[in-house]
Image (cartoon, coloured by chain):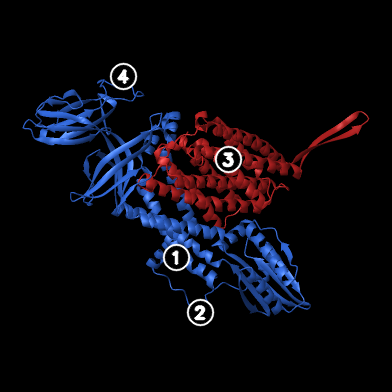
């Protein structure tokens, strides 16, 4: 078992390298090429007037394709890492922050790459891949003993509910991360009208589509969490901080959907709500560090 | 100068109650108000969430001036407060009223949509498709209808000013999905109210091994803990624990079963959950006349003794004897602070202490003694026997008649969301006109600043073109992002 766990970690390390390289390529692809032009007025006495002008041009599509390829490599390594750990533990790795975060890295990568394929938008990777890299860095900083596979505490010994409840939470967070990336890119594209960035309407739509995956998933997280709480603790809602943080996140996305569908909000206003909502996601994700209550075991 | 037409009837001023009801109705129907209510609810939830965290304490540590505010924050139980109940009530009312208000409009869009449109709408649409043909207008309209129907669109036509207006839509009934979703939210609240009003909940139901405890709450049930077993990991934490119980009614055992965490025992509508466990002491107390005052097991743990705050301890009042008795077990956890232990008990020993209870107590001073398992001592007039150590189990017992509502609401909520998001109502309008060379049809989707809807329409137009053998000409206009257009979009979205 220890060998499998070690191999799983090595695969995660390989995935981290691939994601870092992919993020760099995506950033280069999104920013484009910077061309510096130096103009000099030549006189008999030498150059009299020198001006410098910077211009941006779209990067070659090759670097974009390479970024995608590296991201697929990262996802592949991470999938193997999760598979090996699943075999070692006899269950999906979802029980502590190390396992949750490694699975999040995988799902976020997959969700992003699917959106990239559906919409044909590579520039989004310049936002989402750095988020994935940041999560990898966070995993590296976690205490090493969390990498060991431990038996589940009694409260977590419910395989069907733990798998669905926690997996859906990861799916929701990953989809919300894509929506956040779309919102950031929307605000950039809308503000500066960079020619090679996707159209603001496309980004607006992409953000919305990501939320239409994340919001039902988050609803199911709350529902299945309640079902699990009812089986394990005898009540389906305890006003536990982790529960209410998830409810807070759900409500913010509810505001986003209502303003969009009933008040017709599009564009910048919707994008700003998505930024606030993603802050709520981050708060819910890392809340275990500051929350007490029934979900305290989910922390580090 | 104001001109008043005598031909027009003067509007009769409305009565005050009518105006008030109308205002209230409009308030509850207002999307803006609903959004504000959700936002306020979100803020209250955030305040309540942070209350359960160390964040307020960190704020007070960083800014001591904030300490009174932080203390107030911790003291305010947001989720059981009046403002929270108020905003939930307001939101539930808004959901109900708003849903009722929207129902006729939604049904109108489903059952009797407006078929006709204008050339202005088609000209200014963000995307549109033009089909030019040599065949007559009626024939082209029929072909387009057929093409739309093959794409699972419902089609409706109307003739106006010699032109054929064409309307097509798909997944129209998905607009109804908003009702189960919003009904589900109200049902969840109703489930909570029903559970609180007609259910009961025992959070800490202690039963020592071999003991019987009455459940109460009008159930007539008693619970006997037949056996308790636990398995530990190497680090000393519990890996699993199980209670085997027998339910007793009218003195007769009626059902036996086991429960572990995550596997509760259900009896009718009452559910027994495994919550925790601990150490208990079986003891017998008799007075000087030999009358037995207590012969049962006492759970150790819920009480903290000053003699050793870290040790498992229990306290009970022996009213007939006029004393309060406390029992303290050895502190076997090496992680606890040894300097707080004033008793230094060894394994197998217990410390018993009685204190005066009330003015008529037979003792004036506390009396205490250390007793070994199976031994008896005399404390004042009382004879105490430490029979043996036992385990106790902590159960949670609940009856929640709101659960069926919650389950039904969950299905409605997820189903409503899935239909709304994944089967959106797609609509197409068009006009087919006769031209000197035949006919021309122009179609456009009802989609503003909706990238997906435009792509779906373009695919639909291409498919229709292939089916009728006419290459459509696609035309796109840059979306109008002005505030006026946004407001128009807002109105159109409702």
How would you rate the neighbour count of disc 1 (Cα within 10 Å): few for under 14, some for 14-19, many for 20 or more?
Answer: few
Question: Residue beneath label 4, please?
Answer: B339
Q: Where is residue A280 drawn, in percent x and y?
A: 51, 43
Residue nearest the observer in this picture, A175 or B233 = B233
Are dots 2 and 4 on a single chain?
yes
Q: Image check: B344 left or right of B64?
A: left
At x 48%, y 67%, the residue is B103
Question: Residue beneath label 3, please?
Answer: A105
Q: CA distance from mark 2 to mark 3?
A: 75 Å
Are dots 1 and 3 on a single chain?
no
What colour is chain A?
red
How would you rate the neighbour count of disc 4 (Cα within 10 Å): few for under 14, some for 14-19, many for 20 or more?
Answer: few
Residue nearest the observer in this picture, B271 or B139 = B271
Image depth: mark 2 or mark 4 in front: 4
- The blue-coloured chain is labelled B
- Residue A76, picture quadrant: top right
Are dots 2 and 3 on a single chain?
no
Q: CA distance from mark 1 to mark 3?
A: 44 Å
Image depth: mark 1 or mark 2 in front: 1
Disc 1 chain ID? B
Disc 3 chain ID? A
Disc 3 element: helix
Question: Residue beneath label 2, please?
Answer: B6
Residue B386 higher or lower than A195, as above or below: above
> For residue B200, which numbered disc appears in the image?
none
């Amino acid at each position: 078992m220890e060998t499998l766990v070690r191999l799983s970690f090595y695969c995660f390390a390989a995935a981290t390298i691939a994601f870092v390289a992919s993020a760099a390529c995506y950033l280069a692809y999104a920013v484009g090429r910077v061309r510096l032009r130096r103009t000099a007025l030549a006189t008999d006495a030498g150059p009299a007037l020198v001006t410098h002008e910077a211009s941006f041009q779209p990067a070659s599509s090759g670097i974009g394709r390479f970024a995608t390829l590296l991201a697929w490599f990262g996802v592949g390594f991470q999938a193997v890492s999760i598979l090996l750990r699943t075999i070692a533990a006899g269950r999906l790795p979802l029980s502590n922050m190390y396992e949750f975060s490694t699975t999040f890295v995988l799902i976020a990568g997959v969700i992003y790459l699917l959106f990239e394929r559906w919409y044909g938008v590579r520039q989004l990777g310049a936002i989402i891949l750095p988020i994935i890299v940041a999560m990898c860095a966070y995993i590296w900083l976690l205490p090493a003993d969390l990498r060991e596979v431990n038996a589940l505490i009694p409260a977590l010994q419910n395989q069907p509910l733990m798998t669905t409840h926690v997996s859906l939470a990861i799916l929701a967070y990953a989809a919300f991360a894509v929506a956040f990336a779309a919102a950031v890119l929307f605000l950039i594209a809308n503000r500066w009208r960079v020619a090679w960035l996707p159209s603001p309407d496309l980004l607006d739509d992409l953000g919305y589509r990501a939320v239409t995956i994340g919001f039902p998933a988050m609803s199911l997280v709350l529902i299945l969490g309640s079902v699990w709480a009812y089986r394990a603790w005898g009540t389906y809602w305890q006003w536990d901080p982790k529960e209410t943080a998830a409810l807070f996140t759900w409500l913010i996305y509810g505001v986003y959907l209502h303003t969009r569908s009933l008040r017709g909000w599009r564009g910048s206003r919707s994008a700003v709500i998505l930024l606030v909502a993603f802050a709520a996601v981050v708060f819910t994700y890392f809340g275990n560090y500051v929350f007490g209550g029934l979900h305290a075991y989910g922390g580090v | 100068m104001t001109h008043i037409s005598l031909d027009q009837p003067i509007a009769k001023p409305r009565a005050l109650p009518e105006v008030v009801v109308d205002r209230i109705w409009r308030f509850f129907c207002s999307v803006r108000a609903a959004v504000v209510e959700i936002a306020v609810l979100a803020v209250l939830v955030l305040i309540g969430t942070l209350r359960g965290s160390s964040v307020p304490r960190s704020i007070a540590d960083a800014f001591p001036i904030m300490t009174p505010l932080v203390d107030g924050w911790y003291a305010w139980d947001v989720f059981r407060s009046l403002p929270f109940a108020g905003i939930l009530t307001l939101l539930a009312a808004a959901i109900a009223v708003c849903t009722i208000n929207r129902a006729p409009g939604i049904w109108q869009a489903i059952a009797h949509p407006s078929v006709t449109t204008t050339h202005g709408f088609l000209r200014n649409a963000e995307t549109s498709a033009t089909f030019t043909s040599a065949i007559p207008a009626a024939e082209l309209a029929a072909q387009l209808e057929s093409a739309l129907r093959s794409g699972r669109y419902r089609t409706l036509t109307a003739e106006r000013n010699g032109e054929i207006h064409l309307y097509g839509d798909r997944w129209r009934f998905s607009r109804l999905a908003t009702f189960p979703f919003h009904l589900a939210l109200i049902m969840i609240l109703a489930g909570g109210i029903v559970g609180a009003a007609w259910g009961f909940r025992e959070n800490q139901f202690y039963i020592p091994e071999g003991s019987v405890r009455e459940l109460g709450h009008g159930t007539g049930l008693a619970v006997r803990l037949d056996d308790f077993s636990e398995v530990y990991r190497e680090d000393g934490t519990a890996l699993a624990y199980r209670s085997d119980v027998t339910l007793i009614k009218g003195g007769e055992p009626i059902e036996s079963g086991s429960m572990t965490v995550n596997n509760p025992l259900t009896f009718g509508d009452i559910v027994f959950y495994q919550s925790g466990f601990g150490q208990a002491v079986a003891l017998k107390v008799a007075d000087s006349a030999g009358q037995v005052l207590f012969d049962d097991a006492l759970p150790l743990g819920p009480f903290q003794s000053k003699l050793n705050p870290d040790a498992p301890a229990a306290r009970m009042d022996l009213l007939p004897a006029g004393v309060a008795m406390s029992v303290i077990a050895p502190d076997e956890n090496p992680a606890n602070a040894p300097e707080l232990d004033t008793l230094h008990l060894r394994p197998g020993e217990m410390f018993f202490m009685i204190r005066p209870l009330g003015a008529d107590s037979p003792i004036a001073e506390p009396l205490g003694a250390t007793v070994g398992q199976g031994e008896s001592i005399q404390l004042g007039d009382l004879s105490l026997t430490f029979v043996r150590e036992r385990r106790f189990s902590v159960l949670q017992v609940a009856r929640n008649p709101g659960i069926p509502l919650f389950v039904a609401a969950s299905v409605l909520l997820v189903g409503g969301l899935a239909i709304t998001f994944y089967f959106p109502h797609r609509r197409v309008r068009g006009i087919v006109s006769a031209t000197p060379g035949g006919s021309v049809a122009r179609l456009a989707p009802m989609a503003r600043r909706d990238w997906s809807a435009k792509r779906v329409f373009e695919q639909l137009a291409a498919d229709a073109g292939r089916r009728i053998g006419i290459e459509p000409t696609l035309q796109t206009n840059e979306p109008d992002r002005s505030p006026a257009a946004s407001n128009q979009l807002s109105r159109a979205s409702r």
